[in-house]
Image (cartoon, rainbow, N blue to C red):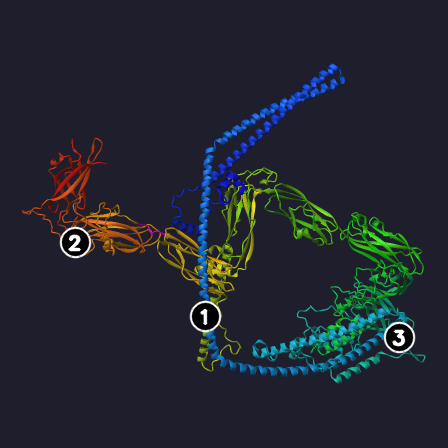
Amino acid sequence: MDDDYGQMFGGEDFMGDIGLEDEAILDYDDGDDNLDLGSDEEEEIESFVGDRDYDEKTPEPTISKQEQLRMIHLRSHLNQLTEKVKHHQYLTEKTREEQKQCRNRMSQLETERDQVFKEIQGAESDKNTSALYRLRARHERVCQELENEHKLEKMIADRLEQEEYELAKVEVERGKFLLAEDDLIKQEQQLAKEKTDMALQRLRKEEMKAKRAIRQHAKRQKDYQTALEDQKRRQQMTVDDAERSHAKHSKFLNQTMEKMQKRHEEENARYKENMRKKMEMLLKLKGDITANRENLKALHARDQAANKEAKQREEEERQRILQEGGNPDEILLIRKRIEEFERQKTEFENEKRQKQATIMDKILVEEDRLKKRKKQQPHLWTDPKSDKSKIVGPQKKKPLKIFRELTDSSIFDEIMKENTYIINGPEEQTTQRDGQEPGKTDTAREDRKISPLPVDSSDSSDAEFEEEEKVNLAVPEFEGLWDQHKPYKVPKDTESTLKLPNGSKMEKEILEKVLDKHRQGIVVKQVAAGREFQGCPFYSKPDVIHFKDFEVGKTYKKKVTLTNVSYTVNYCKYINITEMLKDFIEIQFDPPGQMSAGLTCEMMVTFKPMINEDLFGEVKFLSQTGPFAIPLQCTTKKCDLSTDTCRIDFGTTVIGETLKRTFTLTNKGALGTKFEFFKVTGQKERTVTTAATSLGGLTTADTIRAFSPDSTSVVAKKDVTNSLEKTDEKKAAEDADKASMGGVGTSDEQNGTQAAGEGLSMAGDGDQGEEEQPLQDSPDLAVSEMEDYGTLDGMKVGLVATGELGPFSSTKLEIIWQPHIPGRVDTEFLITFSDPLSDSISIQAIANAIDVPVWVERQTVDLKICMYDRLYQDTIIVNNRATTALRLKFEVCKELKNHLELLPKTGYIQAQSNFSAQMKFLPRKSLFEEAGKYFDKETGVLEAPMIIRVADQTQPVPFTVQAVLTTSDMEFDTTDIDFGCCTIYESTKAKIKLTNKSILPQEFGFVGHPEFVEVQPNDGFGTLLPLETIDLEVIFSPKKAKDYKFELNCKSLINREFKIQCKGVGVHPPLEMSHQVIHFSATSLYDVSTAYFHVINSHTSTNEFTHPVPRIGKGEIAPVGPTSFEFVVPEGSPLTISPSVGTIEPGKKCPIWVRFAPELNELDIKKEAVRMATKALEAQAEKEFEEKLKREREEADQALDEQKAVGKGKGKDAKSPTKGKGKSSPAPSLTVSGPRPISPPTLETITKDSPAYAAAKASLLRQYRGSFRTVTIPCYVASGKCGNPGELPYSVHNTLYLEVHCPVVKPTLVVISDNGKSTLDYGEVSLGQNIIKSVTIQNISNKTVELTSSILNTGGPFLMLNALRVLPPDGTHTILISYTPEKGEVFHEVLEIKTGHTSLHITLTGKGVSPMIQINMPMQDGVLDMGAVLAGEYLERTFKLLNSSSLSIDYCIKMDSLSLERHNIAQAVPAFIQANKTTKLSVGTQNNNGQNVFDLVPAEGRVPPGSSIDLTVTFAPDHPSDHYSDGVRIELFGKEETHNFMIKGMAKPRIMFVHGMDERTPDIESLAEETPAPTEDEDGKLLPTPILFTLRSIAKENDFIPASRDLFVGCVRTMAVSQKKNGEFQFDNVQLITQKGFNIEPQKGMVEAGGLKPVTFTWTPPAGHDPNTPVEASVMLTLKGDVTEQIKVMLRAFVVSD
């Protein structure tokens, strides 16, 4: 850079002549219009230095910035012209050299041509033909070259001419600037001199600063020594105070130490005692532990012996079962499970009892509570004893007294039925209410003895029922929820006995006698041939009336033939049929009368079934020999199921072979059923329940199927069935007993027992449902229902497992035996049926499996997860347990032959040895289609069977190869990336997604990418989880301006490559920034941080071969010249850039300042304000509600007190009407329902000036937790100068970006005064006025901070009055700041309160207003002429004092005549004595009486802004004089003087006067007494008063300019009424002065009172007048007013020159 400047100004010689450093010669690196000569402080020092006269010479004018730029451009132009001259000189010399070489070449060719021509002539003479042809060809070639050289010489001559012309033109152009270059050199020397002077000035400033720093350092050292001495003195004082305090308190300290020592000794004694007790306790514990250890050893030995004995017994039991041919594992497992079940059952019972006890405790507690509540509030419950007396019972029936003899049994039966119903009615209702079964109720009713009196419905039964309902917790709340369907049961056929209801003992005896007599008359013994007939007298055909397989709804008839088989004649009579068959059976029998032996009769039996149940009974007949009966049976359709065998033996089978056995299942019954054939051994528990069937309603068969253990045999199931039947009978008997007791006294335990009785279990208990889950969860034999049942022992059911078996049909079932494990197998199968009455059929299958000699160690070769196109190997180990060698052949299924290989394919395995085969698995993409059924395309699982064939063995050895195949692909979401245009100072980021298509994790890495590309995170390396997709960032950072095309290569760990095509354009912008990223320090809210950087225009040349040039890719090069930029800050960001728009010349740079001022979001503040306002309104509403509620409660209490007072006043006998009812009078109801609704403010109503906004802002400041934000600011660049902001014709590709990191923290200090505003606005203040305002700050941090502040401008109007101090947490401090403007301008300063890390900026602003007072009075040259007034009178004039400023003004009017300095000023030389008469005193003649001549009222006051007040000026002279005057000064705010003027006036003795003549006496009166001149003559007439009036005519070359002057005649306005108001004047003897050239106009006239009349005197020098001789004349002026007065006007005229 320095070399460039040197060349610019004439090279190194010129720079050496100057003799200064290069950097101090030309410093054009300034961004401002003026040279940067230093800061404000340097300017102050410069002004101080400038006061001293270092150079007495007049300084030369400095060179301006524009002139410097012109010099730069001129020097650049001159250098270019010089370069052009040198260039053309070089080209000219080079062309001349080429011309010279060309001419030399031509002379050589001409010489060679002549020589060849001579040789040709010689060859022709010699007739050498061969040489002749050669020489002729050479001659032609030389001639051709010579001709070419002539053409070239011509071209070089033309070019030389052109170059010489260009050189001459450039030299002429260079000559035009010779004079300008001389001036430029002088200016450059002057500029260098200015730089030198500037360096000297800076050196002086630095010296002064150094001296000042030395003085300050000495001062600080002195202060430090003083502070150190003070500190030592204070320390000594502190030591003295401490010694005195120690001597004073030593005795108290000794007492305290004695007490503490005593207490310490007591604590040590207690500690030793506690330690002794602990040691004794530990020793005792040690002994106990030793004793317990011996006991535990004994117990452990006993347990080991017991376990050993148990194992021995178990082994003996196992041996015994093996000897019996059973399966010991199965039987022992069943026993263990039964024992486990019993243990769990016991635990459940105990737990149930505990829970029942807990429930009973809760019930008792609740009953106690109810009893207490009944005692406290008896009116809430009804008294059953009191209500019992109100209940009217039914009318009691009287017992029967008389019995009549009954001959008809049917009538007697009907009477007995009616009586029984009447007697047992209430009990039957109670029984039905308790939910008992009808059959059980009948049984209980039969067992009871008939009471002689009918049972009535009394209160006691109701009370007992109530008590029962209270105790019985198992009764459902709603009917029907717990009801269980009870199938219809046929009542038992009981003996029909006649019972007399309500009969006495005698009546019953009479009844029995009657019946015996009746029976004796009917039955007669039959005796024939001396033998008595015994047995049934009639034989029926069929023997049993059997209606088989009936259906409900149909009618069946059957004829029965009765044959008399007695010895003699007999007869038969149909008596009746079994009671329960009367509804379904109809008997048609006509009694045949007497029948001889052997005769027959017929009877028709009709059966109409109405229920689907078996019915059994008999048809009763009465014969002569006695009664007999024919059995009657009605049976429903049933299944008769059986199998042809119950045991299947498969014999001995080799593992791998498959055998099948079938057996036949036959149904001989008329009812079809569904069957299920399943395996029991090794089967998972099967639970058969439906939505319509509960545990209590299962049939026996379903119960066995539902709750049978895994290996329970059929015998065990039958035992379970029997136990269940016994349990049902026991429960039925218990229910009958409960019914006989009337259902009273039912408790929870009974209900629990009943519930348990309804359940089913193996041991007959009802808790099987609870214990079902642990059995199902047993892991030993639990097998999934989807698995094959034969996987455990090889036995499984065939294809037919379930089906429907019709009536009188059969089906074949199959059992398959396919062993996989050697050994004996005994398996049980079970056939169950849907018919509940059909028992299950058990089938036992036995077999024996033996193993093959060759076996594989791993039946399944799991290759885990494999990738396509990758080789995987494993070893297959084959073992031979045989005693001979065997030949093996490995076979691979044809679907996998292209992918899997077993080597060797054939081999021999030695006896009792093993053989290793190598498996190679290389899955290819075609496996997806070729594997077929062995490959699951959805999951990618490969399960391929492999076979090892053994010679002389039919069963091959199979094994399975398993693998999960997955791809090794990784996929990008895009195939190419276009980064677009990116500058060389920035980076462009593109996001891509990389997906792992494999189910294995894959490591990847981006390798081989160019240096201008970066992949993140982890530099492009990482691991992809299965099927994972990650986001990657490709960062493109071009280093130069060009077009980039490259590949991004991603490699996996298995060396697979995945590529992405990338392209981008590198852009070299015309400008560059010194910093691309700005990191601000942590800035608190409402604080300000600043930083700066430079925007540099380094583009000075378009030569792309010497340095990089600005361009977009390979586009056009940006032009050299001024380049503009514009920063566009995003909206809402707390950043400000200054300047944001500018233009930079080539080779220059511009400083850019970035200001970071974080603030809270206005919307957040408004939301917080709304929230706080809403909370405050809710609190206020709640408070009002509580107050109102309190008032209403007080009013209610007062009303109750008044009611009580009224009640007491009625007397003691008065009773409250509500007392008998047990109710109290209702309290007055409260009318307040809740807090009133509130209407919170909206966001629009919150303004920045409102207190709510300030409170919300303060709340958010205290709650702020900090934030971090990154802002990217674009800088648009365009060539040329910038225009209006926002209209820069930029190119987007040349855009620069500035990244700013903005951390924000919570402020340490906040302003709490003036609603948190940090701006002190003093408003408009008059100049010189002092106003003091305060601002209060608070420390909201949790640390103590030390406050410091910035220094305010010492020459400014602001001043901080009090000092800062250390501020604790939540501490406050008030700062007083005064404002005293001295200039009429706007003042703005920022006071920075610092705490070390954060700062609080307080903005101080105010406007100094110069008071603008306007006085609208007729003044001339600052003089107010009050005119003339008669002596002794006064004159008043009023004018306005107007305040045209924007603030109120306090004014004060001061008169010079009242000033204390008046006499000092009067001591000066009077003006009439001085030659120049420049001094003029404002105070003139004053009154002799001591009063002011002039007075202004009001003399002080305040003028509001924009208004005016009236000022009255009074002129009151006490004696005649023409020199009354006084000075008036108007001061504002007691300091500043804004207006001063003079008031003058004249006092006349008469109303007519003359004014404007020459003064004859001084304007200052003498205080001495003067003898008055006589004004009257001896005759008493007034003497004329002489006045002098001078006229001056100006002489020209040959002529005179007439002189003209006015004389004023005035008339005083007097206050006397009698005086004449107007006056007249007249000039006498005017003709005498006319001859001398004088003229008067007007010569007479009238003057109004208070007016002046001008009279013009004109003098024109007459012809032949001598200019050196003055002309004098006089004229008499008569004034007529209150008196007539004559004035002698003496005229004097003379000629003067210009």
* Residue under the image location 59 percent in, 42 percent down: 1068
Q: CA distance from mark 2 to mark 3?
A: 193 Å
Image coordinates of residue 1496 in percent, x first then y, are 24, 53
Q: CA distance from mark 1 to mark 2?
A: 73 Å
Which residue is disc 1 drawn over? 234
In the rendered view of the protein, which quadrant contains the C terminus?
A: top left
Q: Label 1 sits on what residue type? A: Arg
Image coordinates of residue 1134 in percent, x first then y, are 51, 52
Q: Label 3 sits on what residue type? A: Cys
933 on left or right of 1080: right
Sequence-earlier tag: 2 or 3? 3
Secondary structure of the residue carrying tag 1 is helix
How would you rate the neighbour count of disc 3 (Cα within 10 Å): few for under 14, some for 14-19, many for 20 or more?
some
944 on left or right of 165: right
Q: Looking at the picture, tell me which residue is in the foreground, 192 or 686.
A: 192
Sequence-earlier tag: 1 or 3? 1
Which quarter of the figure has residue 492? bottom right
Secondary structure of the residue carrying tag 2 is loop
Which quarter of the figure has residue 183? top left
In the rendered view of the protein, which quadrant contains the N terminus?
A: top right
Which quarter of the figure has residue 59? top left
- Bounds of the magenta span? 1409-1413
| Outermost residue toward the bottom in this view | 506
Q: Is residue 31 above or below residue 825?
A: above
Q: Is residue 689 magenta?
A: no
How would you rate the neighbour count of disc 2 (Cα within 10 Å): few for under 14, some for 14-19, many for 20 or more?
few
Which residue is disc 2 drawn over? 1567
621 on left or right of 77: right
